[in-house]
Amino acid sequence: MKRLYLALIFLCILSSFSVGAEEFIIKPQTQGEVTFVTGGVGENERNAMQAMRAEYNLNLLFSVRDTGEYLSDVTVRITDSRGNTLMESVSDGPMLFAKLKPGRYIISADRGDGQVIHKKVMVKQRTALSFTWPQEQGN
């Protein structure tokens, strides 16, 4: 009886670990030819994103200047050099990693307050961009 009780406790412990681990799985999304992941809220998600970083050739980070505050819910649009939208999504966290063909792109990031940042980038191998907004007045 004691063995059965210990076995049940052990199974409960194992299942709680697998449920906890699934909460932090970051799943790739695809729009057209662009595959991307987004997240990085909390230590476990941040670690998961960092582990996947090398698989993506465009790494984006969203933050507020001089505060150390990271941003999520940023609308990101990637367009090619002809102006065709290749991907548009809202970030689940302060990081967005994308796989793009080598080429020139315009990355637009909108934090939802009318302050849109546009950056032109040439993606060959791995490229990292930071989008940093000024502090809001009154903060």
Image (cartoon, rainbow, N blue to C red):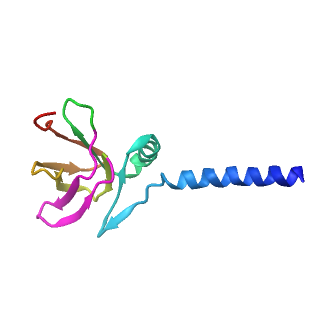
- Queried whether the magenta region covers residue 90, the answer comes back as yes
Count of numbered marks: 0
54 displayed left or right of 105: right
Query: Which of these two is toward me, 87 or 112?
Result: 112
23 displayed left or right of 118: right
Q: Residue furthest top?
A: 66
The image position of residue 37, as x and y in percent, is 36, 56
Q: Give the answer, above or below, for where 98 lies relative to 85.
A: above
Q: Where, quadrant-wise, is the C terminus in this rendering?
A: top left
The image position of residue 44, as x and y in percent, is 47, 43
Q: Residue furthest right?
A: 1
The image position of residue 13, as x and y in percent, is 68, 49
133 displayed left or right of 62: left
Q: Residue furthest bottom?
A: 32
- Queried whether the magenta region covers residue 91, the answer comes back as yes
Q: What residue appears at the point 73 percent right and 54 percent down from the top-left corner?
A: 11
87 displayed left or right of 23: left
The image position of residue 85, as x and y in percent, is 18, 65
Q: Where, quadrant-wise, is the N terminus in this rendering?
A: bottom right
The answer to which image quadrant residue 80 occupies is: bottom left
Q: What residue appears at the point 19 percent right and 59 percent down from the top-left corner?
A: 77
Give the magenta-colored segment's residue range. 70-93
Q: What residue appears at the point 39 percent right and 46 percent down from the top-left corner?
A: 53
Q: What residue appears at the point 15 percent right and 67 percent down from the top-left corner?
A: 84
